[in-house]
Amino acid sequence: MSQPTPSLPTPSSIDAQKRYEEMKRNPVALDITRGKPSAEQLDLSADLLTILGPGDYKSADGTDCRNYGGLDGLPEARSLFAEMLEVRPDQVLAGGNSSLSLMHDSLVHALLHGVPDGSGPWLSQRPRFLCPCPGYDRHFSMLQNFGIEMIAVPLTPTGPDMEMVERLVATDASIKGMWVLPRYANPTGLTYAPEVVSALARMKTAAPDFRILWDDAYAVHDLADTPDALANCLALGEAAGNGNRFLLYTSFSKITFAGAGVAAMAGSQANLDWMRKHTSMSTIGPDKLNQLRHVRFFENLDAIRDHMKKHAAILRPKFACVERVLSAALAAAGMTHVASWTRPRGGYFVSLDALPGRATQVVKMAADVGLKLTPAGSAFPYRKDPEDRNIRIAPSFPTLPELERAMDVLTVAIICASAGA
């Protein structure tokens, strides 16, 4: 790709370079690499630590949660997740703290044993996956770790480029799966349009065992007063005769404690029976005491939504800070053309596009003055952004003053890297 012809630096870019040199003399120590909840957010769930008193260890059906068993999870935990995902409780398995672990195990089981309605273990079939991008770096790293070939699919304002998706899956039986972050996606904040979900549910696939790993990580993570609506993929899949197509995942990781929440998987009975069979080889049951803590803390979906409004009150000023600093600094420099970014209505991230060929330089310049960003290219398969322009911003963890300082560093780096464009 040809680069813009350099021109003489403007006074604004000269000022930014002077500021950058000053920042190098007085470096910061800031990190906005991951979408971690802040301590203030974690404090919202402090009652989880004491909610079970002495002798309070039995679930509603009398299960002693201190003991072995209960591979499906507590019935009341499954019901709570069913409300979140708009499915039936019998379509849910409640597990440990990590939805990423459930996704990982699902892939391992598919590679070693195959899936229902399949033609044997995927491992022997050189499977390939479609990867909408910009996307979640851990999804892509997982596939790369297993040697599964990734095919990048661009995102449109309504979801993945469905013309490309439908063409590929209809003609290539080696394409066994697709990652999906359908609501407030990492990093774009995009929620898939109903027509996209419907197309995913009904499209024809050359592989009869094609699976969509539907990571609904931000199901209730609204920032706006009116939540984004998401079509029900399981119901649409069943109606289209593709009831086994979707494997759904979510968790409480960014609702209560990031490292001590509860995760869940949902799907057809065939898919859940398959997961039970193989999971029984690695565990006798999940942490039911933690599940009990969560169902005591949240009685129903209304209680979860009330809790998430408290999260939103903490997060909204931080997303507003990202918008304010970027807009003001680039406008003052007369360089509003050098970057564009998303304005999400939920989730944890802002996706910024610098000028083509500049993202790696911006990230390095920020790192040289002490601001850590996710490496450029991370939101793409094999960490290769073909245009080298995408940068993920994770505003949740730092304090508001720290975030303002971080965004100041980032905008100065963007202006300096873009000077002459």
Image (cartoon, helix red, strand yellow):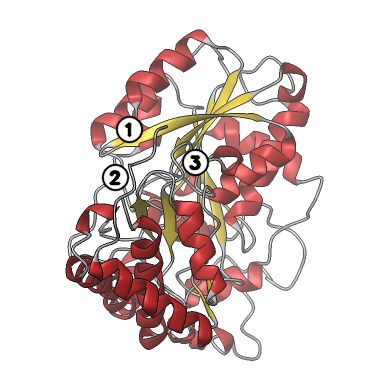
Residue 284 quadrant: bottom right
SS at mark 2? loop
In the rendered structure, which disc, 3 or 2, sits on the residue that comes first in sequence?
2
Is residue 158 or residue 286 the one in the foreground? 158
The mark found on residue 230 in the picture is 2
The mark found on residue 385 in the picture is 3
In the rendered structure, which disc, 1 or 3, sits on the residue that comes first in sequence?
1
**Farthest residue toward the front?**
8
**Amino acid found under the numbered disc labelled 3:** Asp
The mark found on residue 197 in the picture is 1
* Residue 131 in picture, x, y percent from top left: 50, 34
- Above or below residue 196? Residue 106 is below
In the image, which is nearer the foreground, mark 3 or mark 2?
3
- Alpha carbons under labels 3 and 2: distance apart: 28 Å
Is residue 386 or residue 343 the one in the foreground? 386
In the rendered structure, which disc, 1 or 2, sits on the residue that comes first in sequence?
1
In the image, which is nearer the foreground, mark 1 or mark 3?
3
Is residue 278 or residue 99 the one in the foreground? 99
* Residue 52 in picture, x, y percent from top left: 58, 85
* Residue positioned 25% across, 59% down in the render: 345
**Amino acid found under the numbered disc labelled 1:** Val
**Amino acid found under the numbered disc labelled 2:** Leu
Residue 320 quadrant: bottom left
* Residue positioned 37% across, 87% down in the render: 401
Whether tag 3 and tag 2 are in contact, CB under 8 A, the answer is no
* Residue 48 in picture, x, y percent from top left: 53, 83
